[in-house]
Each structure stands twice: as structure tokens, then as C-alpha cells.
Amino acid sequence: MSIDTRDFRNALGKFATGVTVITTRDTEGEHYGVTASSFNAVSMTPPLILWSIDKSAYSRDAYCQAENFVVNVLGSDQVPISNRFAQRGENKFQGIDLEEGVGGSARIVGAVAHFECRTWQVYEGGDHFIIVGEVLKYDYQDGRGALVFHNGRYALPEPHPMTIPQEEVETGEGPLGHHFLYLLRQSLSAYRKDFYPRLEHMGVDEKEWRVLTLLLDRGALPLETIAQRVAQPIEDLKDTLSGLTRRGLVSDRDDNASTVALTHEGGELARKLLQMAREYEQKVFEGVSEKEMSVLKGGLERVIEQLGTP
């Protein structure tokens, strides 16, 4: 069976994971850090965890030969840190609050959990090396949400609606039924359920839709800016852009492929997508007056302004 790598990645994206930054320091004192969602538990006794690193990674040898490393589980407010360590480049640690962990490996201040490890074993795993670590020390913070990776983009962990008492959901008599966040989440879920299949009829998925309409609205943008605006990790965004590039919908504006713009064909498709989205919005809110819509949108804009964008 022939496996399409991009489609296989999409399938794996259905499994939600946390987001970590794995850090280590070599014998020369140089620090290394890489974003990884492959972190997982292996054993309770002894306490073992694992993660994997691409064999083509620049820091591969440093991690495979390291005696110690630290797993920093990122909080939901640490998307910029995840994006920084997902890229190649120097000075990844510049401007980030750090503490010293086992073997001199960096502990990222503000992470929701740290696992300080001694390398237990390194195994071959196809195009990756699987690194198993014995946990020597750990700590965590209660009351803070962790960053989640799902469907090729960053997400937030939320209580599942099925855990809510059914009588409160149906009657709305409990405080939850009229809670702003609950109503917003329920309306968004219902809206997306019918809207996303319409994207498929236009030949794009939800990730491609966000990129195309963003570039239509803002023009050519740097890779990092796009990743932040569409809440997608850099490496997964590159995969999305690769598919759009192959179809002639986006192009690179420079040799370093750091700035992305719509092609003529991409602009035409993005305008059609935007028109479809407007028509769908009109259909959904056809029973809502213009005044009510103005109040609703204005209220949401004020909430965003007050709370700030993520």
C-alpha cells in the first residue's frame, strides 16, 4: 500500500496531543531546544517517558548522545515559544525565562510541567530516533491549561459537553445554559458542522481556508505571522503551504521562502471562498435582524478588545 505522507499526517492529526519543548546541553555547554508532540509515558516503575526526533534534525546527535534532557510541557499561552523552537536557527533561548535543570538542561519558566530525565535508551524508528528517558525529577502547576495540538493546529483543552448534566443542557435552568462561553462554544460547533463541508466542495480544507482568506485580507505575509494568525505550528503550516503551492494557489516572495503571497489563481479562489462564507452567514442569520446582528458583532468585538487577542 502506497502512503501519501501529507494525508498520513492529516490522519495522525486527529489524535490530540500536548506540545512540549525538549531541551538539553552538550559537553561544550551549548544549549539545544526542539518542539515535539511525540512525548508519551512508557512506564510507572521505573518512571519512563519517550519522545522522537527526526534523523534529519540538526540537533539529532546532541540529543542521541546526551546524558540528560528536560521535557517542558507548554502552557496554553506559550504558542510563540512552541513556534520558535519548531524552527531552525540560532538564539532560540534569547529572551525566554529559564532555570537550570538536570545536567544543565534548560527548564522553561511558565511551562505547566517539567520532566527532568536521564537518557535510558535510544532506538531506531524509521526516519526518527526514539529516545526513552528515566524521570529523575518532575513538577507541575495545577489550575493552568496546557497547549494542545489537534487537526494540524494549536487548540485548547476544554471539558467535554457530554460531561455536563443533561437536564441543565436541555432546560437551561442551570447557570451553564446561559453562560457566555458555553453559548459561544455551542454556536461555533453548530456553525462549523455545516460550514466545513462547504469548503470541501470548493476543493480546500479548513486549514487552507484560513491561510487563503488571511492572505486575501492582509496581502503577502511572513511565515511566522501566518502561523500566529491561523494558530498552526510552523512545520504543519509548511505542509499546508506545500499543498497550496503545488496547486498554484500561493507562491514564495523570496529565495528563503519566508514570505508567502497569493497567486492570481489563489486570489480568485479566496474571493470565491469569502463570497461563499458571506452567503452562508446570511443564511444562518436570516431570522436575525440587522440591528441584532450589529449588537452581537459589536459586543463580541468589545469582548475581544477587552480581553486581548490570544
Image (cartoon, rainbow, N blue to C red):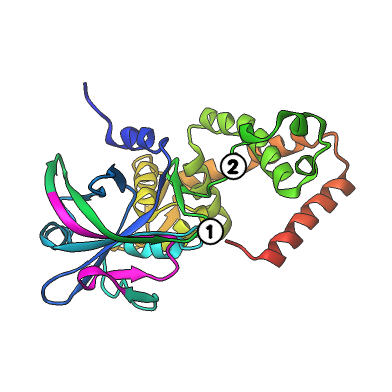
Picture quarter containing residue 174?
A: top right
The answer to whether 273 appears left or right of 171 in the picture is left
In the image, what residue type sits under mark 1? Arg
Q: Is residue 170 magenta?
A: no
Circle 1 residue: 144
On the image, the x and y values in percent for residue 262 come to: 46, 52
Report if residue 222 is visible in the image: no
- Say few, some or many: other residues with alpha carbon within 10 Å of mark 1 (under 14 / 14 to 19 / 20 or more): few
Image vertical order of residue 297 relative to residue 194, above or below = below
Image vertical order of residue 199 relative to residue 102, above or below = above
Task: Out of 273 and 227, give the one closest to the viewer.
Answer: 227
Task: Out of 131 and 186, give the one closest to the viewer.
Answer: 131
**Label 1 with label 2: CB-CB less than 8 Å:** no
Picture quarter containing residue 310?
A: bottom right
* Secondary structure at numbered mark 2: loop
The answer to whether 26 appears left or right of 95 in the picture is left
Report if residue 237 is visible in the image: yes
On the image, the x and y values in percent for residue 124 come to: 11, 43
Q: Residue at x 58, y 56 (%)?
A: 217
Residue 159 - label:
2
Label 1 vs 2, first from the N-terminus: 1
* Secondary structure at numbered mark 1: loop
On the image, the x and y values in percent for residue 55 come to: 15, 50
**Disc 1/disc 2 C-alpha distance (Å):** 14 Å
In the image, what residue type sits under mark 2? Pro
On the image, the x and y values in percent for residue 196 come to: 57, 33
Q: What is the magenta range?
A: 100-121
